Image (cartoon, rainbow, N blue to C red):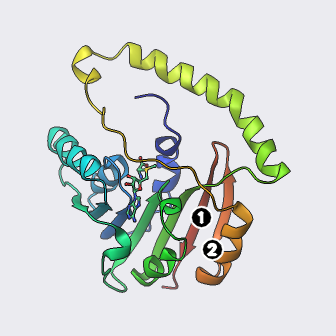
């Protein structure tokens, strides 16, 4: 696996999982790497993605990983799914929200249980000088990280080399970060948004307990 900007932030995202989290939803799960990490914590995980190929790979990888619990993967567009209100303790969207209209966050907000947490690892296009400055800072760090991960990969066994060939669909983000901040302030009042180094932002929204 080459260095992956989304996977790089898994640990940061897992730190946002509330205590006693029982039910989680991963939106745009792709091949399910983050959903499996949640399931490995003993959480009941629903994971949705409209890509048949990605969901088939998610199922296959979960079977071969053989963790204690497997996420419930479902091939679906989350905007077509009727999410149970107040149900999830944790909802995550990793690099997927820009594939949808941002206002889908209202449905995700309503699906949170009291004390629940919504995290969005989001992508944004470079529009402002500040965006470009962050990108410039990320380039050398990214290069070093890629080299380091490639070196580790070279030492992996040939048996594992065939795994993970399916890639989840990607598309470039179009919504500028300042628009994301503005819409989030209305739909997710009190949320925090901060820039992360590798062309990402982290949005965290918590409901009252
Ligand atoms: C860049 S991939 C990220 C995959 C995964 N979250 C990860 O971190 O590797 C974006 C994913 O969002 C999914 N997606 C696009 N539109 C969606 C929708 N309406 N509902 C749910 N997922 C969607 C795509 O199929 C794709 O798998």
Q: Quadrant of the N terminus?
A: top left
The answer to whether 16 appears left or right of 201 in the picture is left
Specify the quarter for ligand 1.
bottom left
Q: Residue at x 73, y 49 (%)?
A: 126
* Label 1 secondary element: strand
User: Is 29 displayed left or right of 207 in the figure?
Assistant: left
Q: Residues within 10 Å of mark 1 (few under 14, many from 20)?
A: many
Mark 2 and mark 1: Cα distance apart in space: 7 Å
Q: Position of residue 61 (x, y in %)?
A: 22, 41
Tell me which residue sits at (63%, 30%) in the image.
142
- Residue found at x 47% / y 57%: 96
Looking at the image, residue 204 sits to the left or right of residue 75; the answer is: right
**Which residue bears the numbered disc 1?**
203
Q: Which residue is mark 2?
A: 191
Q: Position of residue 71 (x, y in %)?
A: 23, 57
- Mark 2 lies on a secondary structure that is loop
């Amino acid at each position: 696996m080459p260095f992956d900007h989304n996977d790089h932030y898994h640990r940061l995202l897992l730190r946002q999982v509330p205590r006693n989290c029982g039910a989680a939803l991963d939106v745009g799960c792709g091949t399910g790497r983050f959903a499996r990490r949640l399931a490995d914590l003993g959480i009941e995980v629903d994971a949705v993605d409209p890509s048949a190929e990605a969901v088939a790979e998610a199922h296959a990888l979960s079977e071969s990983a053989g963790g204690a619990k497997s996420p419930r993967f479902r091939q679906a567009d989350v905007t077509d799914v009727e999410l149970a209100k107040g149900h999830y303790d944790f909802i995550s969207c990793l690099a997927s929200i820009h594939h949808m209209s941002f206002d889908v966050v209202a449905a995700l907000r309503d699906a949170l249980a009291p004390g629940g947490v919504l995290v969005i690892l989001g992508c944004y296009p470079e529009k402002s000088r500040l965006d470009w400055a962050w990108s410039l800072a990320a380039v050398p760090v990214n290069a070093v990280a890629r080299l380091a991960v490639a070196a580790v990969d070279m030492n992996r066994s040939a048996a594992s080399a065939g795994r993970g060939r399916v890639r989840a669909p990607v598309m470039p983000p179009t919504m500028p970060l300042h628009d994301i901040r503005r819409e989030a302030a209305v739909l997710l009042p009190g949320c925090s948004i901060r820039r992360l180094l590798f062309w990402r932002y982290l949005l965290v929204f918590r409901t009252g307990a």
